Image (cartoon, rainbow, N blue to C red):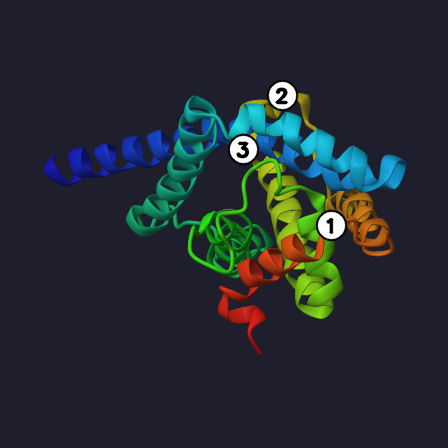
Amino acid sequence: MSAKGDGSKLRHTVAVLTNVAHISAPFLSVFLIIHLSAPALANVGGSSLSSNVMLLGREYYQTGFGERYLLFLPLAAHVASSITKRIISPRSAPPRKITSTLSLAAYSALLIFLPIHFYTHRVHPANPSPPIFEVGPSELDYEFIKTGLARFPWRSWILYGGLVASVMVHAVEGAQIIQASRFASRKFRMRPRTRKIVAGAAVVPILAGLWTLSKEPLLVFASLAERYEAAFTRSWIYRF
């Protein structure tokens, strides 16, 4: 009875962790739609439209409440529940292989691309010391992105491309899993090839927008461009 009871509790815990991962996913999806619509819209209106959309989007995810409860908390819950589930899942119901497309995309974003992106675009520009002098939110628009693409082209393309691709692949794979577990009666399934096509279709307009931005001239004062570059080079990957 004790073994059965322990097994039942473990299965219940895994089920709760699964629910946490699934419930937190829509919050992250809303953030992605808002955040990634800015570079995609560069195809239509260039850096001016992208900057305006980004500044509007910050009203959702960079306010005191929004950033804490609509972005960081769901992200922490999503990551913690998924990792914990992988650790405690019983042998009778093992977790998805770490070499699966879903897992590879998730860990690539979580361990490589996301930390570099966050520190490069959020932490380092806020450094008050010279020569950065704390680039303010109103100064940190898509001219910052354009400066990175112009000054550090191959690194920027690898990091932006890797981040967008890994996030989109994980989102599509995860959406299929949530749909299958929550709405199984609809019998909607995408084949692996179809899921890759859907992820690719989401990635293309974003990278095309970045390409459009990279072809624009820099419209920033030289002094601010130097502060931008200093913020980039605070990250080790932009120093060599």
Q: Is residue 205 left or right of residue 31?
A: right
Q: Disc 2 marks which residue?
A: 185
Q: Earlier in the sequence, mark 1 or mark 2?
A: 2
Q: Is residue 111 above or below residue 44?
A: below
* Residue 148 visible at all: yes
Q: Foreground residue, 105 or 6?
A: 105
Q: Outermost residue, bottom direction? A: 240
Residue plotted at (42% across, 22% down) = 65
> In x, y percent, where is residue 9?
22, 33
Residues packed near mark 1 inside 10 Å, few (<14), some (14 to 19) or many (20 plus): some
Disc 1/disc 2 C-alpha distance (Å): 54 Å
Q: Nearer the viewer, residue 92 or 178?
A: 178
Which residue is identified by label 1?
Answer: 220
For the residues bearing labels 1 and 2, Cβ distance under 8 angstroms:
no
Foreground label between 3 and 2: 3
Q: Amino acid at mark 2?
A: Ser
* Three-letter residue code for mark 1: Val
Instruction: Decide which of 122, 8 is in the foreground and name it.
Output: 122
Residue 125 percent location from the top left of the image:
52, 51
**Label 3 to label 2: alpha-carbon separation:** 25 Å
What residue is disc 3 on? 28
Which numbered disc flags the more N-terminal residue, 3 or 2? 3
Q: Secondary structure at mark 2?
A: helix
What kind of residue is marked 3?
Leu
